[in-house]
Image (tube, helix red, strand yellow):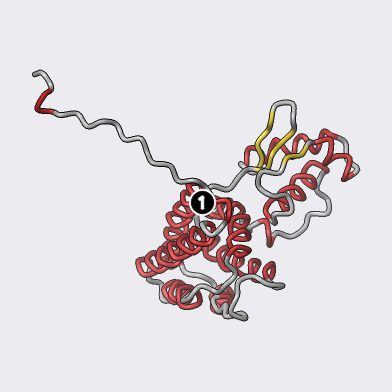
Amino acid sequence: MKFEPALIQSAHDGSNLMEQAYQRLKREIIELARKPGEQFTEQQVAAAWGLSKTPVREALARLHRDGLVVPIRRAGYVVSSITLSDVADLCDMRTILQSEAAALTAAKGLSEEDRTRLVELCVDDGYGQLGGPHLDERLRANYEFEAIIANGCGNDRLAASIIDVFDEIERIGRLAVMLEPEMPPFRTEERRAVVDAIINRDPEAARVAMKVRTQSARREILQALTTSPEVTSVEIRVPVIPAAVDNARVPR
């Protein structure tokens, strides 16, 4: 079985109404058409799309399990917020999963077709920016790169976990690019190091190269998010520190 991030999955024309509502809502949330903190009801969605409330309700329950929406008692749903701590945790999980997948893929080896495609995809010079009119195209190419490595590891559960993480990271990545569209340095070099290690069938080099690459991405994302006015304008409070206990005066 091959797994693909939502962005590059083929459309399923024959899918049921719940699946259609789920995919449409999910894409709206990931693409920031429905912004973090935005509130809405299932009735509003159903009326706008000409659907009954049942498939929309089922789709929203699934999105709640995904962590993309939060139900509000008697007030509908709100799009989940993005916090620095959650982003850091997600990026750390990405590093753990992808580093191991890269090592397994290097040990197992890829087909000639996949090796050739990885070499093509590792070049991402663009026009000096990650943002711009070709953002969707570049994200699609990036996730194809990730999916080849994830699927090449030979462990379906690991591959599926990586793809789930990327569906969440896409929303964060889009926000980070809006805040900081400049091309990060060494982006292509870090990709090429991963590809070279996989092609050379060197698991440890692949693990290290992927760790370096994902940790760079973590720093770039967090740095971009900290430029948000919602972060920079937050009042910093003095922490309350418990009084130190003088051990010398504690009765023995």
The residue that label 1 is drawn on is 87
Classify residue 85 as left or right of residue 51. Answer: left
**Secondary structure category for the residue under label 1:** helix
Q: Is residue 2 visible?
A: no
Image x and y of residue 185, in percent: 48, 76
Residue at the right extreme?
Answer: 50
Q: Looking at the rendering, in which quadrant would you find the C terminus?
A: top left
Q: Which residue is drawn at 70% across and 56% down?
A: 31
Classify residue 199 as left or right of residue 179. Answer: left
Q: In which quarter of the image is residue 225?
A: bottom right
Residue nearest the viewer, comparing 241 with 51: 241
Image x and y of residue 191, in percent: 49, 73
Residue at the top extreme?
Answer: 251
Q: Relative to 161, say whether 146 is above or below.
A: below
Give the total of numbered labels: 1
Q: Can residue 19 be seen in this view?
A: yes
Classify residue 179 as left or right of residue 97. Answer: right
Residue nearest the viewer, comparing 207 with 111: 207
Q: Relative to 170, say whether 62 is above or below.
A: above
Q: Quadrant of residue 250?
A: top left
